[in-house]
Image (cartoon, rainbow, N blue to C red):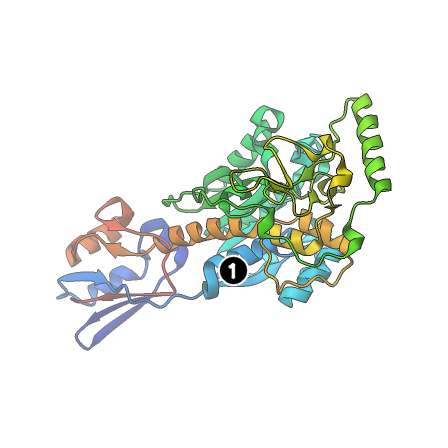
Amino acid sequence: MECIVEKGDDICKCPVETTSLYASGIGMDTVPACVNSLQNLEHIDVSNNVKKDPWKGIDLFAGIGGIRLGMQNAFGSDLKIVYSNEKKPKAIEVYKENFGDDPTGDITKIDPEQLPDFDILFGGFPCQPFSAAGKKKGFDDTRGTLFFHVANVLKAKKPDAFLLENVKHLVRHDKGKTFDVIKTTLEDLGYHVHHDVINAKDHGIPQWRERTYIVGFKDDLDFSFPEPTGEETSLADVLDKDIPKSFDMSERYYRSLQQRELRHKEKGNGFRYKFKTIDDVAETLTAGGASHETNLLADGVRRCSIDVKENCLENGTSISTVDHGTYKIRQLTPTEWKKLQGFPESFKFPVANTWQYKLLGNSVAIPVIEKIGKEMKRSLESKKLKFEQPLSLPKLRELVINGNNLSSSSVVVSSLPSMVKIINE
């Protein structure tokens, strides 16, 4: 990185380390000499016409690449993935097919110091230890410590920002103590941490999917999570046409669901199957079979309204209270699940349907990631060296030589593009 000062035909180039810029606004060891060589320069300003290399990102617990897709959608050509990591063979197979990268690896066995340099870390560390559907062991579960491998990477590489995704229950597990440990760990590493629970259904996806998102920046930047869009969507927006009969629910399967519900009820468990109309939103997709049973579709059936009065159900009425034989009940297809997570039509699954369901259930709602990514990019782009008013050369020399952080004076300082040009106006 260089600081280029121009005065007429004279050019002074000063190599500047990014870390020095974070610490003091301008490299302490190089800029004073550079500035002193241009004694007659009266005022300086920063050109907005600067060259910026793409941010470099790493994709941990990559799965099939859902978070990567969302971040790439948000950053476009301004993001280059330099490393990815995933342990499950089927997920690796799908990841390689769609991105051309081999993410094979075990995060517990990597040396963070050996990773390539990067600017943004993102990943969804394993959900089960913090999930309401799991055993609620949290950090007592050995997999709960996988978070600390993420922390070790952040500690070693000190990227500008990170995005982490986990289940909604994370924020209240063990009366909030689990999340407090995570947040404190990240703050102790020097990050300004933001978190929110966001439901995919509030962002154009017809799926009730609440997830905890944690965003961190090395600098204290202005950041806000995306607001709900207010857009109304339903299963009708993602349904396929000409569904094979193999997805239809048989009478035998229906009876088995009734028997399973009765057994679980006697044991005090919460299992139940649910029928959806095309006007409903899907329940949360998961890797387990329960997602099928809570998202059984009454194909073609609507919710009754002023405009819909036939072949419909009143709001609040479940088809389970109605003779199911009146309706065609079926499972949602893998392609419909793919749409419910926001994956593009071009995304390929070189695995059997059973694995598609599992992998998609473990993935993320891509449109939510994309919106968060856009907000992160906006924040990172605000980190430009600029003067709120022309700064005299003596004042600049005073600030730099005294070791003051320029951001505390009349200057806004932050992460710089690959080159900043300081020009004489």
Q: Residues within 10 Å of mark 1 (few under 14, many from 20)?
A: many
- Closer-to-camera residue (178/310): 310
Q: Secondary structure at mark 1?
A: helix
* Above or below, comparing residue 267 to residue 391 in the picture: above
Residue 395 is situated, as x and y percent measured from the top left of the image, at: 17, 53
Residue 342 is situated, as x and y percent measured from the top left of the image, at: 58, 53
Residue 357 is situated, as x and y percent measured from the top left of the image, at: 72, 50
In the image: residue 111, left or right of residue 215: right
The residue wearing badge 1 is 72
> What residue appears at the point 51 percent right and 56 percent down from the top-left corner?
71
Residue 165 is situated, as x and y percent measured from the top left of the image, at: 57, 44
- Closer-to-camera residue (231/124): 231
Residue 22: in sight, yes or no?
yes
Residue 112: in sight, yes or no?
no
| Quadrant of the drawing holding the C terminus | bottom left
- Closer-to-camera residue (333/148): 333
| Quadrant of the drawing holding the N terminus | bottom left
* Above or below, comparing residue 350 to residue 292 in the picture: below
> What residue appears at the point 27 percent right and 49 percent down from the top-left corner?
406
In the image: residue 226, left or right of residue 81: left
Badge 1 amino acid: Gln
The residue at the far right in this view is 252
> What residue appears at the point 56 percent right and 52 percent down from the top-left corner?
366
